[in-house]
């Protein structure tokens, strides 16, 4: 017991002597570290605010602001280690080795971050655009380094890893989405009249993009009907609302104008043998 107490006393004396000899240097080092952290934090926010004021994409501004914060902190930590007499060269080698091992173990995650960085720099889409990728469609709510979040008309948040976005075929229709309809009319109907009726019906629906449509015409000549194709752009967050409203408006207009919507029929003949 006495031997252990003596060892503890020796260790305590060594620590005390070290603090007496290097107390001022340690205090200055702590001040540098705290000051560096505060400066890095404020500078990062200042860079982000400056980019936002210049109307640069919010995601890109946030990324560059955080990057500036991180770079300054790296320099501050290297300065602190140098003041304490710790060589940073072996530390860099260790970090490099650890990074290699972590990279092999976290390939999927790193691929997401690399893809996110590509998205932020090249900006193939921004917040508010309508994106269709990997069979999912929705408004871009936010873009992160690891994933992109879409939100559909039902307020469902869809999280897509960025590695599944970059390099894939994607459709970006900005804030609108294409609505495609098809309705059949009897062959005895005048297609010109039908197209005019559909145009007037759609004009009564507010919110449809009239600058780029609607486009209406004969889609095909089916067995029992002339199929009229209808295409127009509507806000993505109300896609189904506009689709259903357009169908109802066309139905009411056809009923009012006496336009027949045919249905499949089968004729059966009975013969006596």
Image: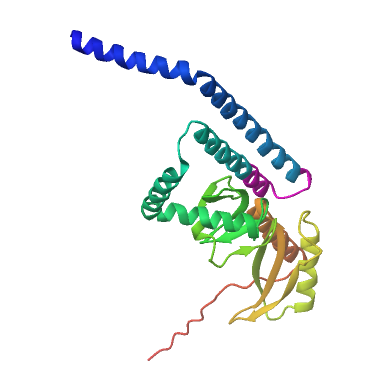
Where is residue 18, by image quadrant?
Answer: top left
Q: Tell me where residue 79 appears, x and y as whole percent.
A: 55, 36
Examine the rendering and report whether any part of residue 9 can be seen.
yes
Magenta extent: 53-65
Query: Left or right: 74 with respect to 192?
Result: left
| Front in this rendered view, residue 169 or 204 | 169
In the picture, measured across the screen, residue 217 lies left or right of residue 223, that is right
- Left or right of 146 in this view: 248: right
Question: Does 214 sit above or below residue 63?
Answer: below
Quadrant containing the N terminus is top left
The dominant secondary structure in magenta is: helix
* In this view, 243 is above or below 258: above
Q: Quadrant of the C terminus?
A: bottom left
**Residue 55: in magenta span:** yes
**Residue at image coords 57%, 36%:** 76
Q: Is residue 161 visible?
A: no
Q: Which of the 4 quarters of the picture holds residue 202?
A: bottom right
Nearer the observer, 20 or 206? 20
Q: Indicate the position of residue 42 as horizontal and vertical percent values.
A: 67, 33
Depth check, front residue: 223 or 88: 88
Residue lying furthest bottom in this view?
Answer: 273
């Amino acid at each position: 017991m006495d031997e252990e107490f003596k060892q503890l006393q020796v260790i305590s004396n060594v620590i005390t002597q070290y603090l007496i000899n290097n107390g001022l240097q340690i205090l200055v080092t702590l001040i540098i570290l705290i000051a560096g952290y505060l400066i890095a934090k404020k500078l990062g926010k200042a860079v982000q605010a400056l980019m936002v004021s210049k109307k640069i994409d919010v995601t890109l501004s946030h990324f560059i602001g955080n990057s500036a914060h991180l770079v300054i902190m790296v320099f501050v930590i290297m300065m602190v280690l140098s003041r304490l007499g710790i060589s940073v060269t072996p530390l860099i080698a260790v970090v490099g080795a650890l990074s290699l091992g972590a990279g092999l173990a976290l390939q999927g995650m790193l691929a997401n971050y690399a893809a996110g960085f590509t998205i932020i720099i090249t900006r193939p889409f921004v917040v508010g655009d309508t994106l269709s990728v990997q069979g999912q469609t929705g408004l871009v709510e936010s873009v992160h380094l690891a994933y992109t979040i879409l939100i559909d008309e039902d307020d469902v948040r869809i999280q897509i890893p960025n590695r599944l976005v970059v390099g894939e075929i994607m459709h970006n229709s900005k804030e609108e989405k294409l609505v495609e309809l098809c309705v059949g009319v009897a062959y005895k109907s005048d297609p010109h009249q039908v197209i005019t009726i559909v145009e007037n019906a759609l004009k009564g629906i507010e919110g449809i993009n009239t600058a780029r449509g609607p486009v209406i015409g004969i889609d095909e000549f089916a067995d029992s009907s002339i199929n009229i194709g209808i295409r127009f752009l509507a806000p993505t967050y109300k896609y189904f609302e506009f689709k259903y409203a357009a169908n109802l408006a066309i139905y009411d207009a056809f009923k009012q104008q006496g336009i027949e919507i045919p249905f499949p029929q089968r004729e059966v003949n009975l013969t006596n043998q």
